[in-house]
Amino acid sequence: MSKREIRNGLSERLRADIAAGFYRPGEWLRLVDLEERYSVGRFDVRQALAKLASGHMLSHVPNRGYRVVETDRKQRDELTDTRLMLEVPAAELVIEQATADDVARIEAAARAFDEALGTVPYPEAQKLNHAFHHAFYDCCGNRTLIDLIHELRERNLPGEWNQWAMPTNARSSSHDHLEMVEALKAHDRERMAAIITRHLTRWREGASSGN
């Protein structure tokens, strides 16, 4: 394996761990800990951290290091609005293009997440949640759009820690997934748009109430 492949693989592993919640918003990432966890050298760790910082999953503080991003209300509002602009049209493409096998995979991913809630640790549940969204949008047929959706979603994931602190919020997200599957089966574009809008903006209810 080349050095470039090692660095790229490390950045993807670290990205996946951040998305899964192994590292919390605001948490500092210590080089020595990352070297031990991923069994790589310091140079490779630094390269991976710089790559994730360029993608806004980490922030770099000169003379201090890297930490997982903490999005403020304005940033999260902007991310949410942009995601709506991308994900609602992408869902229409999924309705148009998903095959029976695609629908079966999407439904299986939704049910796997639903069944895991309350029985597995948060990072494992978040991986299953992540898998559902990948299974769903990967069927839209536009690779550039797919990559943008996943990139923006990953940038927003650290903000979900507070949202998912309440089990009812995680259960509501799962209910949305199952409804998305039903809308997909029915080719119901209007219902799908409403579900996705609710899914992406639910966090604002807690923010406005001070939770």
Image (tube, rainbow, N blue to C red):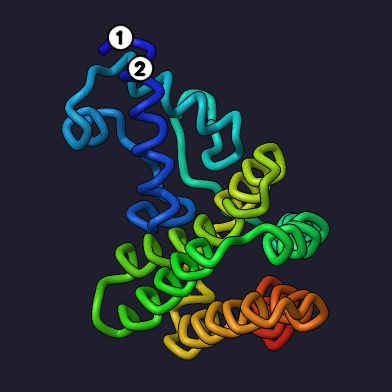
What x and y, as percent, mark residue 29?
Answer: 36, 39
Whether residue 85 is visible here, answered yes or no, is yes
- Residue at 42% over, 69% down: 109
Nearer-the-camera pick, 81 or 77: 81
What x and y, as percent, mark residue 89?
Answer: 80, 60
Is 94 situated above or below 36? Answer: below
Given contact means CB atoms under 8 Å apart, are the residues at marks 1 and 2 in contact? yes
Amino acid type at image mark 2: Glu
Q: Which residue is denoted by mark 1 in the rendering?
A: 2
Amino acid type at image mark 1: Ser
- Secondary structure at numbered mark 2: helix
Nearer-the-camera pick, 211 or 157: 157
**Which quarter of the picture shows residue 33?**
top left
- Side of 119 where 65 appears, left or right: right
- Side of 40 where 169 appears, left or right: right
Mark 2 is surrounded, within 10 Å at the Cα level, by few (under 14), some (14 to 19) or many (20 or more) other residues, namely few
What x and y, as percent, mark residue 111?
Answer: 40, 79
Q: Marks 1/2: CA distance?
A: 5 Å
Q: Residue furthest top?
A: 2
Q: Which residue is denoted by mark 2 in the rendering?
A: 5
- Residue at 46% over, 41% down: 67
Nearer-the-camera pick, 156 or 6: 6
